[in-house]
Every structure is written in C-alpha cells, then in structure tokens.
C-alpha cells in the first residue's frame, strides 16, 4: 500500500519513527512517502491536473526536501493519505456536538458553519484529494502539548465522547477517518508525556532542531508509537 | 383667565415643546403606561425597524428574550436569522401575518405544507431568506419551521413584554388556501401565480381586527403579557397599489398609526411608543434618514432609543439618559438590518434607466 503522509513540522517525529520501524520490519507492506511544509504553509497549495502543487517557493522547497526530490503530490500515485498536524484537537468539536445533540433543531448549513473540520487545512487537503481520488484519507491533529506525566489528573471521559462523535460524523463522509494520538504517549487525557518532548529533531537542514522541551514537537520515540498505531489502522482499511 | 390649557405642561404646547428648543432637545415624547424593568423579558418582532429595539434593549442591560438562540460558537448568527428577532420568524410586516404566526404557535391552525424549490434547495415561503442557501430538503425546512413555531410560542408564553413594530398594510395571500406570504411570491423566492397569488391592501378595520385577534390569542396563553406597539418609520420599498410610492407610504403608515393608537387606547396592557413620529416628524427635518430618504441612520436610531429609555427612566426611575448606551453603537456592533422587503428594489431598477 502506497501511503502519502502530508504534514507540517510534526512530520519530523513520524519520519524518525518510520526509520526505526522499517529497520525492525514492523511496517512491511506499507510504502510511506512524506510531503511536509512548516506551520500552516500547506495552505499555499492548489489542485492542478490531479496533483497538489505548491503555490509558493517555501512549500515547493519543503516538499522537495521532505519527499526526497518531488515538488508536487500526484494524487493517483497513492492508495491512502494521512494528513497530520493540521487537524484540530477533539475538544474543538464540543460546540458542534452540543448543537447537533441538543434539543434545538439546527439546519445542516448552520452545523456546517460550526464544524471545526471545515476550517482546517486538513479539510482543504481532504477536498483536494477527494476531487480526483477515492482513496482513504486519515486526518490527525498535532501532538497534545507536553507536560510532566503527574501534572494533571487523568480525564478521558469527555475526550472519548468527542472522539466517538468525530468518528460518527466522519463515517458520513466518504472514506474519511480520524486518527487519535496513541494512548501510550498521553497523560492527563489530553497531554503528551514530557519524555516524548525531549530531543526532537527537525529533519530539515535549513532550520535548527526544535528546542528540547518546547512542549510542542515530539521526538522519534513518539513517532514510533504513532506510526505503529497508524500502521494498524492502515492495514484495517 | 383660567381655562383647561392653562395648567398643561410645556410638552403640550408647540412653542415650548418644539419651537423654542433645538430639535435634539425635544423630549418627553412618550408617557409609558407601564414599566419595563431590566429583569423583564422582552420579545421583539415586526418589520425591519423592530430589530433596533431588541439590540438597544440588550445593549442597555435589559433582557431581550431570544427563544431561538444560535448554537454557541456560530460566528455569524444574523446570517441565519438568529438574534434578529426573538425567534427566527424573519420580518413580520403586517398584523395579519402576526395573527397567522400566533395561530400556528397556539396550534389554532397548522402551517401550510407549501414548500418552494430553488435549484434543488427547499425554501420556506414564510421565511424565504432565513437560510441563505435554502434548506437541503423539504424535511429540513419543516423541522426548522417546527422549531421556529415552538420558539415563537415560547416567546409569547415566557415574555413579560411583546414589542411589535407595524410595518406594512400591503400583503400577498394564497387566495385558494387562505394564507399570507411575507413577500410576494417570485420576489424573494417561489414563483408568482396570478391565479392563486392575490394582492391585499389592508384597511384600518382589517389591520385593527387582525392585531386585536393576535393580542387576544397571545393573552389567552399568557394573561400577563403586555404589548408595546410601534410603527416603522421606514417608507415602503415598493407599492402594488395604483398610487405613487410616497402616497402609498403615507396611506399605509397613517392606517397603521391609527391602528396603533386605537389598540393602545383599548387596553391598559397595550402601549404605543412613537418611534414613527420621532423619525418622521417635520420637526426633525429628515435628518434621521440616509440620503436615499428611506433607511433610518444611526443617529435616528440612537435618538429614538435614547428617548425610549429616557422616558421609561423619567417615569419609573432608573439610569439617566446620559448613561444610555448608544443604540447606534449596538447596531454597529452587529450586522446590517435584515429586511427582505428591500429585495423589491431589484425589481424597480430597470425602470430607473
């Protein structure tokens, strides 16, 4: 299965995880390809002749570095897509879930305006891909902010309610799936264990590595957990 | 020499009330019959101008009783007709249309099954612009209408004061099935059918009777409900009568003004607030209108609402006029008025060439 992973700076941890897992032959049968561009620069892409093409030099150069020389994503080349780091955390769906599950009737148009997915870059990329491909598309948020594991009480009830709701909502959309952060990396329900926030590499020689303990960018150990869990989902499709 | 006029206050005489004052110092334009307290729940409905009242109430710490609220987080609720009136009825221009909504709300009548179609989307004939792109299906339209009728009923049963702004006497009805549209079919949606769509221009008796019935029905489910009636100072966008639009406007507003006077004299629980006079009186030289001489400008809205609160506070106590938050600012903070009737402008443009 040829899988295209489209992401931002959070691709670095995943790439390190893949390198490790490939050496252990844990992800045999999955051919994973990266296209990454920093921060929200994935907005600077357009759909052209069945390809996702950069509209700025920044994205073009980033695609080239992260993919090993390619400047554009030929959508038909892949069996599945993972759009990582440009989705939203589960809690962003609270307003939509409350509106949809509440006693007051709201039209589909109103609910669509509330839908946080519609406002994300992952939604934009989903629509670009779906225009020309029937492939499965997986979206996932960037890692939860990192904290020391003992800093907060564990509360996953609300989070899992939102996850169930997102899954239910995505089932109504063609071959769209949400992928959530692996539980082994999580503390307090919605935080990343701080051990995964140490020594994160950027994987792009143009920029310095991430500041260790920045709370945001995770290391290769995180990537191993992520890719291992993701590969299970990909095989189940 | 003593006579009945000698003991009257200054506001009763043109010279002391008007001629000897700067126009912006004209005051005491309203002697409220009953108090509206900040804790009272106030529902607002009617023509475009009614929208100012709700927003000004809210801006000044009063309870604008919105019974059909937008979902939390909706970035532009007015786009979908939320926070415009107390529920998503859209404009209710005529007293007969108010009566129709009230009958649906108290289940004296069922809403018609009619649905309009526009490029595969479903349109509510009684709120043709409430969903900017139309409803996705007839079923969604019906569910939305069921919601607004419930919410409209809640605003009757749960409010202390019901503010209604009389807007028009001209209306369009389905003559075969006996119901009224807020807009002529074929303008804001639907297709005009000369066989079934009939123009009706309400006279004084019709307008009064419909308003009286609507009030009686609302009081039958909420015996404590008080009413504040106003007349929109906004001229007609278009008339279907044989008259020039200026003449038609004057006739229509005169009827509505007389109806408002009559209904407020009939009941101690109905009051009239003179926003119509404040904007339209020659005393104010038309300064409260935009250059098109139709739309009321922010200064006008502000002046109306300052008078509203000043008169209330003057009679019943409360915050002074100086503390009143600008109604125009409340409007500026929000969106432009939602006024379907202005769609009729589009049909007059060709004739201007």
Image (cartoon, coloured by chain):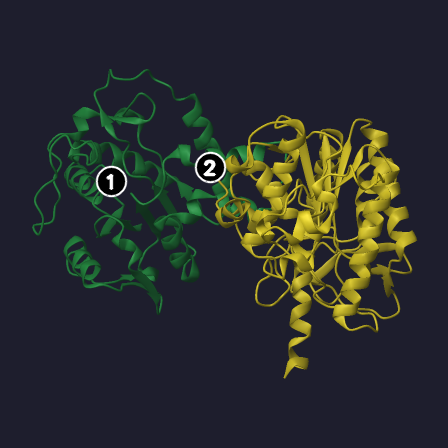
Chain colours: A green, B yellow
Of B170 and B144, which appears nearest the observer?
B170
Residue most extreme to the front? B1
Q: Chain of mark 1?
A: A
Q: Residue at x 25, y 49 (%)?
A: A31
Q: Dot 2: few (<14), some (14–19), or many (≥20) neighbours within 10 Å? A: some
**On the image, which quarter does residue A127 sit in?**
bottom left
Query: The residue tagged with tag 1: helix, strand or loop?
Result: loop
Q: Which residue matches tag 1?
A: A27
Q: Chain of mark 2?
A: A
On the rendered structure, is A213 left or right of A184?
left
Q: Earlier in the sequence, mark 1 or mark 2?
A: 1
Query: The residue tagged with tag 2: helix, strand or loop?
Result: helix
Residue A210 position, x and y percent, is 12, 39
Q: How many marks?
A: 2
Residue at mark 1 to residue at mark 2: CA–CA distance: 25 Å
- Whether discs 1 and 2 lie on one chain: the answer is yes
**On the image, which quarter does residue B352 sit in?**
bottom right
Q: Dot 1: few (<14), some (14–19), or many (≥20) neighbours within 10 Å? A: some
Observer able to see residue B112? no
Please give the label number shown on residue A167.
Answer: 2
Please give the label number shown on residue A80.
Answer: none
Residue A94 position, x and y percent, is 47, 33
Of B286 and A85, which appears nearest the observer?
B286
Residue B132 position, x and y percent, is 59, 56
Name the quadrant of the N terminus of chain B: top right
Residue A142 position, x and y percent, is 28, 39
Of B240 and A107, which appears nearest the observer?
B240
Q: Residue at x 83, y 46 (%)?
A: B261
**On the image, which quarter does residue B11 sit in?**
top right
Observer able to see residue B228? yes
On the rendered structure, is B240 left or right of B289?
right
Of B198 and A209, which appears nearest the observer?
B198
């Amino acid at each position: 299965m040829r899988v295209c992973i489209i992401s931002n700076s959070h691709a670095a941890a995943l790439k390190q995880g893949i390198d490790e897992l490939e050496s252990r032959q844990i992800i045999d049968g999955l051919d994973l390809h990266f296209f990454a561009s920093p921060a929200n620069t994935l907005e600077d892409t357009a759909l052209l002749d069945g390809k996702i093409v950069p509209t700025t030099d920044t994205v073009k150069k980033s695609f080239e570095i992260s993919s090993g020389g390619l400047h554009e994503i030929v959508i038909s080349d892949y069996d599945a897509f993972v759009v990582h780091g440009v989705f939203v955390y589960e809690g962003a769906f609270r307003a939509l879930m409350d509106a949809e599950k509440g006693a007051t009737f709201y039209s589909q148009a109103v609910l669509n305006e509330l839908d946080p997915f519609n406002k994300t870059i992952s939604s934009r990329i989903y629509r670009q891909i779906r225009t020309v491909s029937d492939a499965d598309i997986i979206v996932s948020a960037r890692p939860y902010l990192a904290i020391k594991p003992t800093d907060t009480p564990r509360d996953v009830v609300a989070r899992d309610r939102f996850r169930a709701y997102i899954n239910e909502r995505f089932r109504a959309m063609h071959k769209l799936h949400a992928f959530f952060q692996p539980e082994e990396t999580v503390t307090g329900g919605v935080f990343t264990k701080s051990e995964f926030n140490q020594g994160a590499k950027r994987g792009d020689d143009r920029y310095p590595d991430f500041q260790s303990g920045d709370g945001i960018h995770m290391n290769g150990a995180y990537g191993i957990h992520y890719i291992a869990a993701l590969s299970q989902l990909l095989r189940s499709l | 020499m003593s006579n009945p006029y000698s003991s009257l206050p200054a506001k009763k005489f043109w010279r002391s009330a008007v001629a000897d004052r700067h126009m912006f110092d004209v005051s005491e334009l309203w002697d409220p019959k009953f108090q509206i307290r900040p804790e009272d729940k106030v529902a607002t409905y009617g023509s475009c101008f009614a929208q100012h009242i709700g927003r000004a109430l809210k801006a000044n710490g009063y309870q604008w009783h919105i019974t059909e609220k937008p979902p939390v987080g909706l970035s532009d609720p007015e786009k979908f007709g939320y926070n415009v009136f107390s529920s998503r009825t859209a404009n209710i221009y005529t007293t007969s249309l108010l009566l129709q909504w009230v009958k649906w709300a108290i289940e004296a009548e069922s809403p018609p099954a009619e649905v309009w179609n526009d490029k595969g989307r479903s349109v509510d004939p009684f709120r043709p612009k409430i969903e900017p792109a139309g409803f996705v299906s007839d079923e969604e339209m019906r569910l939305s209408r069921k919601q607004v009728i419930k919410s409209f009923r809640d605003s009757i049963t749960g409010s202390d004061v019901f503010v209604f702004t009389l807007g028009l006497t001209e209306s369009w009805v389905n003559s075969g099935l006996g119901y009224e549209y807020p807009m002529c079919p074929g303008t804001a949606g639907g297709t005009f059918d000369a066989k079934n769509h009939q123009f009706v221009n309400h006279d004084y008796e019709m307008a009064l009777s419909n308003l009286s019935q609507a009030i009686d029905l609302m009081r039958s489910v909420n015996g404590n409900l008080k009413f504040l009636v106003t007349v929109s100072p906004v001229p007609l966008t278009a008339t279907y009568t044989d008259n020039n639009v200026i003449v038609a406007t004057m006739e229509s507003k005169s009827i509505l003004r007389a109806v408002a006077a009559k209904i407020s004299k009939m009941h101690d629980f109905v009051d009239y607030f003179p926003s119509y006079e404040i904007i339209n009186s020659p005393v104010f030289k038309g300064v409260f209108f935009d250059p098109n001489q139709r739309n009321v400008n922010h200064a006008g809205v502000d002046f109306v609402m300052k008078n509203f609160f000043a008169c209330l506070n003057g009679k019943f106590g409360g915050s002074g006029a100086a503390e009143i938050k600008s109604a125009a600012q409340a409007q500026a903070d929000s969106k432009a008025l939602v006024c379907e009737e202005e769609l009729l402008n589009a049909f007059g443009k060709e004739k201007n060439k």
